[in-house]
């Protein structure tokens, strides 16, 4: 076994931005603890931030974009996935107008990400149909 490495990172479970230290050994996360130097959380973590990291190593985790082709999910490049999305949204907007498109944002992401999401909806897709999970 290799020596453990301690890597400073930011928790991905919400938009708060808590600082974490990941103990990584042989390219696998072994333990997570709060970063005492992080101004947001000063070493404290929630249950998810401290213990819910096994998904990183899950065998069934998606590792690339997928599109359904001939009824089967197939791995594709990011360029192909983005092209599929862009063409689909453009077609809906052209046929039905921007108001036919809605988007669900997420409280687990950053304010900046949510800002750009609503800006995209309102300026590119011409829709105010955006909601989020902030009430949960």
Image (spheres, rainbow, N blue to C red):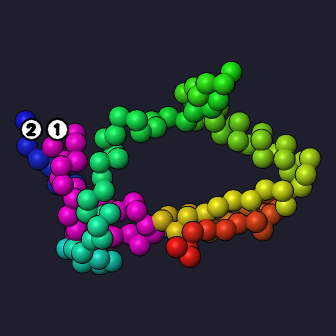
Residue numbers of the magenta segment: 8-35
Look at 11% across and 47% down and name the residue there.
Answer: 4
Look at 91% across and 52% down and name the residue there.
Answer: 96
* Rendered location of residue 78, percent (x, y): 58, 35
Q: Is residue 15 magenta?
A: yes
Q: Is residue 74 left or right of residue 13?
A: right
Look at 35% across and 47% down and name the residue there.
Answer: 55
Helix, strand or loop for the magenta stretch, by majority: strand
Sort mark 2 into few (<14), some (14-19) or many (20+) by Cα contacts within 10 Å: few
Look at 31% across and 56% down and name the residue there.
Answer: 52
From this viewpoint, is residue 20 visible?
no
Sort mark 1 into few (<14), some (14-19) or many (20+) by Cα contacts within 10 Å: few
User: Which of the labelled discs sits on residue 94, or is there none?
Assistant: none
Mark-to-mark CA distance, 2 and 1 = 6 Å
Secondary element at image label 2:
loop
Q: Is residue 49 magenta?
A: no
User: Which of the labelled discs sits on residue 2, or is there none?
Assistant: 2
Q: Do the CB atoms of the residues marked 2 and 1 lie less than 8 Å apart?
A: yes
* Rendered location of residue 21, percent (x, y): 22, 61
Task: Name the residue carrying label 1.
Answer: 26
Instruction: Tell which circle, 2 or 1, labels the residue nearer the N-terminal end.
Output: 2
């Amino acid at each position: 076994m290799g020596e453990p490495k301690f890597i400073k990172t930011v928790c991905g479970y919400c938009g708060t931005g808590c600082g974490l230290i990941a103990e990584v050994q042989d390219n696998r996360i072994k333990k997570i603890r709060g970063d005492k130097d992080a101004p947001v959380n000063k070493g404290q973590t929630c249950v998810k931030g401290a213990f819910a990291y096994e998904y990183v190593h899950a065998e069934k985790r998606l590792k690339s974009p997928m599109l359904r082709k001939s009824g089967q999910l197939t791995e594709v490049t990011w360029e192909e996935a983005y092209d599929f999305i862009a063409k689909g949204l453009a077609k809906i907007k052209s046929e039905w107008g921007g108001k036919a498109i809605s988007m669900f944002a997420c409280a687990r992401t950053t304010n900046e990400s949510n800002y750009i999401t609503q800006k995209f909806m309102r300026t590119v897709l011409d829709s105010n149909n955006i909601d989020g999970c902030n009430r949960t």
